[in-house]
Amino acid sequence: MVSGLLSPNTRDTYEVTEQKKGSFHVVYVLRSSQGHKFCLKIPAQGQEGRWSCDDAILLRSEALTMRLIQQKTKVPVPTMLAYDATLGNEVGAPFILMSYIEGEPLSTLWNQWIEDGTQAEKEPLIYAALTHAMADLSLLTFNKIGMLSFPDDNGMPIITDRLESRSYYDDDDAGSYRRVWKSYGPFETSKEYYMDRFNANKCLDWDGLPCGVELAGVRKFLDVCMASIPASLDNEDDSKEVFGLAHDDLDLENTLFDEDCNLVGIIDWDKVHMAPIYLSYGAVPLWLHEDWNPSYNWPYGDVISSPWTLAKSRQLYGSALRKHLSKPDDWLVPEKSVILAVLEQAFKEIDLAEMRCSRFMTRIIPMIMPTVDPADFFHALSMNEEEEEDGGWAKIVDFDSKQCLIEQVTKLFRCLPKQPDGPKAQHIKEDDTSSYVDDEAVNGKIEASSDETRVDA
């Protein structure tokens, strides 16, 4: 099958030299008789009875978005050679066939550097290389939060609703997870996106939250957080929010480097989507969120990085990113982008929403009110809800009103101050029959019309 896709007019043969199995995909490394290497990525649930229309939409979006990134930026992604989002092909499963990138996952290199004591020397080089790629990715901007859909493989994409999944272990297929999809959006503002995710999770049973956190109190404070979500504005004269492409799992395993700390590849673009600047190219990578994870228990267990080390690393990353983007020092403070990313993650991962929301809340309160115990705050906030005209706010909040608390949270979340005038992204209208971005253009912007719907694969 592979020879028919890659070299139909030759007698090249291919053999599997390596198999890498993850929770949601299996990747086969192939070597041709000429010595060339390729990757064949097959979804774990790409089989009869499990493969859905939404799965097909996601695979097609991933494959064609990777090609778009490679065509319009210098971000190192695998070359997408072929894809099939159906079961009816010679492989017998949906697949993406890609070039193979020679490089080591940062997870492997990171552990080596810790052991040989060179981590402090290598870390700034890693951040410089990765932020250079993110700055290049920032040249692609969009006017909605959603996902790219391609009505035609060689045509211009449109922005459609974003698909996210709830994952659960499949007892009938040991070792794999099944994903059930739900669509959201598209959204024109960051606040609209967060509010939709918050409202979608209000039906959760939040009983048993740790630290004695009361359900009603948590929900009230989350209402405040939702009212304080910052707009995704990059320049002072932006009248509408702008959004960037977001890798859904920018972690140690998906960033490949060579021995000289050059970034050679960013892989696994599954569920790539558009998001606010502070959740897309402006976000710090996931491994620098470690101290915000529910399982983080430094200095116990296998946790290596202390909170102070992670805070310092976030500052290093933020400084490198601002340098490549030519932004001032107060643009996109990393600590604040992490807070907003953790809040978004709390609603995105339904199974962990209770735990993540609780940890998020108990970390945020001391930042706003250092002398107030979070558990006491939420407990008091949840009391006498029906008896108080203001829902119990006046008795416990040491500000004049709920609005004052909103102002404090808004100040904490603010991570994109207004900027001086900068270069404008090119606006490409949907009826433009030219390529995604003019060959001479540096920036590109995709706009979505209000009547767009998701296109089935």
Image (cartoon, helix red, strand yellow):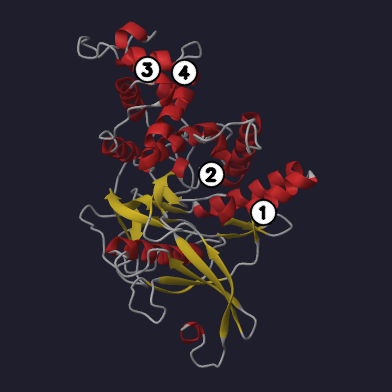
User: What kind of element bears circle 2?
Assistant: helix
- Return the mark for residue 286: 2
Q: What is the x, y in percent for residue 357?
A: 40, 31
For disc 4, the marked residue is: 368
N-term-proximal mark, 4 vs 1: 1
User: What kind of element bears circle 3?
Assistant: helix
Instruction: Answer left or right for 260 relative to 277.
Output: right
Q: Nearer the viewer, mark 1 or mark 2?
A: 1
**Which residue is pictured at 36% across the width and 60% down the height?**
172
Q: What is the distance, in whole Å, between disc 3 and disc 4 at their CAs?
A: 14 Å
Question: Tag 1: residue type?
Answer: Thr
**Which residue is pictured at 62% across the width and 35% down the height?**
301
- Return the mark for residue 378: 3
Q: What is the distance, in whole Å, between disc 3 and disc 2 at their CAs?
A: 28 Å
* Residue 238 showing in the rendered view: no
For disc 1, the marked residue is: 108
Above-or-below relation of 111 to 220? below
